[in-house]
Amino acid sequence: MRPFDYVEPETLEEALEILAADPDDTVVMAGGTSLVILLKQDLIRPARVLGLRRIAELRAISATDEGLVLGALATHGMLARSPAVRAHAAALASTFAAVATVRIREQATLGGNLAHADPAQDPPVTLLALDGAAVARSRFGERRIPLDTLFTDLFETSLEPGELLLRVELPRLPVAARATYQKFLPATRDDYATVSVAAAVATDARGACTHARIALGGAATVPLRAREAERSLMGRRFDDAAIREAAALAAAATDPIDDLRGSASYKRAMVGVWTERALREVA
Amino acid sequence: MTGPTILDRPERRLDGDEKTTGAAKYTADLEVPGALQAAFVRSPYPHARIVSVDTARARSLAGVRAVLTGADVRGQRLGRRLQDWPVLCWDRVLFVGDRVAAVAADTREIADDAVRLISVEYEELSPLLDMDEALRPDAPVLHPDGASYRFLEGRGERPAVPHPNHQGHVLETHGDVDAAFARAARTFEHEFATPRIHQAALEPRAAVVWVEGDRVRVVSTNKAPFNLRDQMAATLGLSKDRIVVDNGTIGGDFGGKGLSTDEFVLYHLAKATGRPVRVVTRYADELTTTNPRHASRIRLRTGVDADGRIVAHESHALFDGGAYAAGKPTARLLVEGGVETLEGYRVPAARHEAATVYTNQVPGGHMRAPGQPQNVFASESHLDLIARELGITPLELRRRNVARPGDPTTTGEPWHGPDLAALLDRAALDIDADRPRPGGRGIGFALGVRHVGRGSTTISLRLGRDGTIEARTGVGDQGGGQHTLIQRIVAATLGVDPVTVRVRRLSTEGPQDPGIGGSRVTPVHGGAALAAAQALKEKLGGRSVAEAAKALGTGEEIVVSAKFDATASDHGACAHAIEVAVDVDTGAVRVLAAVVAVDVGQVINPVGLRGQLEGGFVYGLGMALFEDLALEDGRVRAANLGDYKLPTIADVPPLRIVHLSDGHGVGPYGARSAGELVNPGVPAAVANAVQDACGSRVHTLPITAERVWNALPAPTRRPSGPVRS
């Protein structure tokens, strides 16, 4: 690891000023689980690392009238255990509980996870299905970034230089909505998902679909919403035929990369299988 | 022969306290005052000519103490037997990661910076990336000067090879194979493939080398220090007694640490700077540039009579040796465990052709039972396929064909070893083979047979006035429990408490020792410990150890030394039974339960043995399901442990180990070797269970979900989602 300056401000304002002073040569560290690997492998050589851990306000998890607010410094472990997160959507808590191993979960943060934009990660998929939006701030003000526009490519986000990710906001789910996260782990238990699917669905008294969100992981270079699949469900009876059609549309929406976890065609087929399983789970 | 009761008590490992408290000193922990750090310039191409190397900018960097290129060490090659691997390449690079230049600097960071400042101009050459291409008659020859390479002395000669891109080649026959095939009622032929996989020891390689007067001092992670000394002497043109290898604690080996590649250039850097030079290999370099298990392609053909009894067998096995044969210590330059397919069965006539092949890939080396997991995956999968074709159960086919004492085995030698049918029956009983199972569930069997190692070593014992005994040996303990084994055999033989026996490892200034490997330590070092303890007993002339100690004057001690040569032929054996569940929509395999019935003779270290057997199973499970170094255009894709997936404890099913023994092991007190016994059979047992569960036959390791899914019989696989091309 190369020498660098390490600064650990007490307040958000201080942090934003440090970042603004030299945005190109400053990297932000939340839990550090990914960043430290990049530093140790000499893949990045920042002049300065800006540690956020003393900024307590970024750690808060709270339920509001509008929904749920998750601080960027909340760890995966905190989120997995949080009664507020569970009350909002048990699937969200179980998504965080399914990441990596206990050592990683107690260190890795929500904000770090989103900013790192690793397409194999779990939380972005469920957050996307729950209509999450990130809130970022720079010296010039705050900006709300819907999660489907946050991820732009492999390890790339739409965060601007000088911007810090502060929190994720989730709107209340429609009454009677059910959500799930399905992670396909055909190799070791600690591996990244080959593909993953999050779904949130609500139906009315007649069994017709009033709300449908399907998000896919491992299906492209960024987490995807399967919008055509969602549209195919809306207003329709949420039955076997509807589920199969939506699963087929979700698979068709993918553009997976060939890698060690599977060929593109296998991943595409698996998105079909796991979308079907996810939808049956919430049916 | 039944051992004394001391051996039945669970042992307290000699290295346990220091490892669990963190006090153990590994090579990387060694603080050598004034040591410089080395780093290497590595080839980005699988095959290229070196046009020029410009080191001027690196040399002028502050803190850089020496820069060497291939031109400085031209002609020097290293290796365990055939020395074909350049200390630094001077004319051509033969794999991605081959070393072209080396730097010694004040810090690792400066050394890394200097490496980046060295510019190498290459002329790319077309690489030979697969074995068929390499063995074409008109293929470019990767080692045109191969005939001039040094071949280190030892047992056996390097045989002639039919193609210059062969590293080793053998054709062995016993019986009239063609006539036997002609008599066969039915003949079956199948082909199997396995990828490169890595030893993945927790501790990466490390070394420190310095020059002290006329001595060259080496501390390294090599598990056979005398062999490293001999290799360095040959490569560097030094006499053996000038080099002293004195290794510290070794953090796992699994065969990989028989090959050292850095110590040679570290010597040159130490000489150039007058200072110690050290290197600790990064894990990415471990995975991408060292000596993984050979990838293989094995074709088997077997003829059976009307009762399903094997009458004739032949095998053609190709092992991808990569750029250099340096990682193989045997005279034939083969992975010997890969030659004799269908080991453990009665085979009246057989022909085995096996070869290792030069390609522009990572050089292959030794790994836990070298060659055997590839062989057993092919052999035991082949048997299941034959059973299915014959309409008899895989277990029944094995029962009819396992070798019984005196039966001709696949080598033509009569069988010496455990009761194999008893092991199979016990494994079948314990997995409850006859119980009906729901759809998607299946069980698979495999037999594992491993020779008990041979060789010789010397162990001395010193009894002091305080009544304690010090055993001195040239062998280290890389985690396998070697020192505890020596301690317990000495204690058991002399009837003393094991805590009164210490084990001290000597450097290469002590008596010659073959090091760890080849399932050798239990019979060889265990045998020497027994012989030394018996010699001491004799010298005591009927007195007890305590009585003899009391009679000693100040500074006096009783010293005995025994050289032991283990020559007897014997095998350990095990039978695997594994139950799996397959998700037929995805191909995902879950191992639900496993039974390993083993015969390893008398147990010396009960706790250590359990570790070896359980660890061997998990090791085999990784090969079966997960591990693949996955080269693409000569470059390792799984270059970190996030992508190169090893089993975690959560991936390990409930495992039952059942001990049977015929009581005839040739090792001390009737012991047999155990470290390389269990892992080879696991992949075939899993593959056989997968076919039993869902009909998918996977011929290529690892058994990934995608491979299982692709091999599902048509009606099983449900279409789900349109597949875009």
Image (cartoon, grey):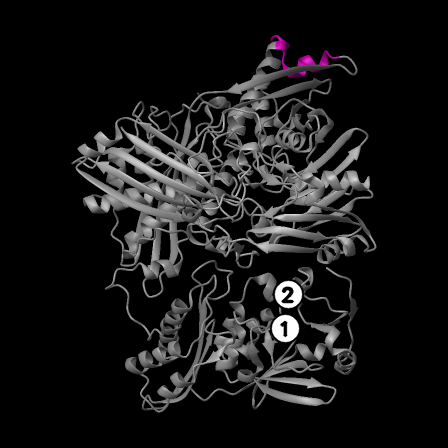
Q: Which residue corresponds to mark 1?
A: A112
Name the quarter where the C terminus of chain B is drawn: bottom left
Question: Where's residue B48, x and y in %?
Answer: 58, 52
Does the residue at mark 2 contact the one at mark 1 (Cβ under 8 Å)?
yes
> Upstream in the sequence, badge 2 or badge 1?
2
| Secondary structure of residue under mark 2 | loop
| Left or right, residue B147 beside residue B499 | left
The chain letter for the residue carrying disc 2 is A
Q: Please, what is the three-letter code of the amino acid marked with disc 2? A: Thr
Q: What residue type is labelled 1?
A: Gly
Position of A32 with respect to B348 (left or right) is: right
Question: Residue at (23%, 64%) from the top-left corner?
Answer: B715
Q: Are marks 2 and 1 on the same chain?
A: yes
Residue B551 is covered by the magenta coloring: yes
The residue lying at 39 percent from left, 85 percent from top is: A228
Whether A279 is drawn above or below B177: the answer is: below
- Name the mark on residue B627: none
Q: Is residue B376 visible?
A: yes
- Residue annotated with mark 2: A33
**Left or right, B673 with reference to A141:** left
Residue A269, image quadrant: bottom left
Magenta span of residues = B539-552
In depth, the one of B543 and A148 nearer the eye is A148
Quarter of the N terminus of chain B within the rendering: top left
